[in-house]
Amino acid sequence: VLELLRAVQRGSEDRKRSLCRLRWALQNKETQQKFVRLDGSIRTLIGIFTSSLADMQMEAARCLHELSHSSDPAVAEACLPVTSYLLTYLSGHSVEFMELCLYTLGNLVIESEAVRKQLLPQGIIPVLASCIQSPHEAVLEGLGYVLSQLLQAKEAPTEIIPLVLDSVLPQHMLRLVCSGLKAGIGAAVEFAWCLHYIVCSHTANAALLSLGALPALTSLLLDLASEIPQDAPEGLELLVCPVLRCLSNLLAEETGCKVQIQDERLLIALFLILQCFLQQHPFIVQECLWLLNNLTADEPFFCSALLSLDLLPALLQLLPCSQMASVLVLTVLCNIAEKGPAYCQQLHRQPALPLLLPTLALPDPEVVGQCLELLHLLFLHWPEAAADFVTQGGHQALEQHQSTPELQERARALLEMVRQPLGASAFSPCHTTLSAFS
């Protein structure tokens, strides 16, 4: 390492070759740590990085980029003197050079709070706001990467997001996310995660709603669903995931949002996405069900639409997908059942009860508990369901849970309801809008 550094410092004819060798050497974690401890190492790289020799400048940038991959905060902090130059070079240089600078910044931001605290007064947010109007997909994707790393920082809600909101970044982020199918999907994915992190901060939803985020993201989801059967671009699931999370969290956080998007096509879009990604990308199922739950909680419109569009059989088919899917499907069914007798009657008409019996036999207390919640609502609002449940062997299924501590009270209450279908409720219903993952 020392010999490579000396060869670079001497400025000999093979300096570029020495830089190339140094770059390869800096892919090793121990070499990175040794290099930054050498006197004048970073200063030498900065000198070449800021020179007028384009090819040497690029090699120095690649060396700095390798250093930025280090998971050691000491290596990131050794790079503190280069941050102002990285920001300066985000204007007026080649696309490849700008892209390299952006990813180097993004990597440094992840590992070091000191780097983040230095970049803010150096003006990283105004610089990124200027770059976001670049016509180059590679630059936009790199910019999205930097911004997403900044927005995940623990100090983001108080120190970073206010600066972002005071810039033109949010409106351009929303524009780029929603044009993902026409422009580059890579940049759209990065900015969709940026929006998600902003929503999860609980500090900026009013600002995003005022920009029309809710109708824009809803429209995007409809467009994404329409692409699925024939022309779905590779990696579409990577964009669908953060878009679903943004919508889920906006609905969970902001009252009155559901009224703005009362469009039953949204339900059709969700089930098309579910059908498409169920086998290859099952994580999308959970994301769709979070959104479906938040749409149906407290909102008769989407409960009625789900039934009238005959989407209940498709929903019931998702019960065995996974533990979380089971809980979420049952929660959505509870949201519907809670709306009253007419809704419970329609649930009873569907083959829901036969599917609930094997669910009651599962060893998972959370799934079984949610199933008991649903049965309580059905028996309360539509006693005929209780009678059918008994004829299908439901009595025995309930009895087995009388000895399970977290379930026994509800199981006994349901057994009492089965004996007296028109009796009073023994435990109160529980449903909630759920925040998606942060």
Image (cartoon, rainbow, N blue to C red):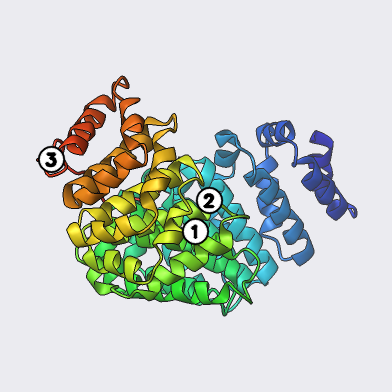
Whether residues under marks 2 and 1 lie with C-beta atoms below 8 angstroms apart, the answer is: yes
Q: Amino acid at mark 1?
A: Cys
Foreground residue among 377 and 357 = 357
Seen at 34% across and 30% down, the residue is: 396
Seen at 62% across and 63% down, the residue is: 235
Sooner in the amino-acid sequence: mark 2 or mark 1: 1
Q: Give the label, 2 or 1, closer to the camera.
A: 2
Residue 9 horizontal side relative to residue 80, left or right: right
Residue sitting farthest toward the front: 391
Mark 3: few/some/many CA within 10 Å (<14, 14-19, 20+): some
User: The N terminus lies in which quarter of the figure?
Assistant: top right
Check disc 1 and report the residue beneath it: 241
- Callout 3: helix, strand or loop? loop
Task: Report, in whole angstroms, how far the alpha carbon at label 2 lies from the one at label 3.
Answer: 36 Å
- Callout 2: helix, strand or loop? helix
Q: Amino acid at mark 2?
A: Phe
Sooner in the amino-acid sequence: mark 2 or mark 3: 2
Check disc 3 and report the residue beneath it: 425
Mark 2: few/some/many CA within 10 Å (<14, 14-19, 20+): some
Task: Report, in whole angstroms, how far the alpha carbon at label 3 lies from the one at label 1.
Answer: 39 Å
Which dot marks residue 283? 2
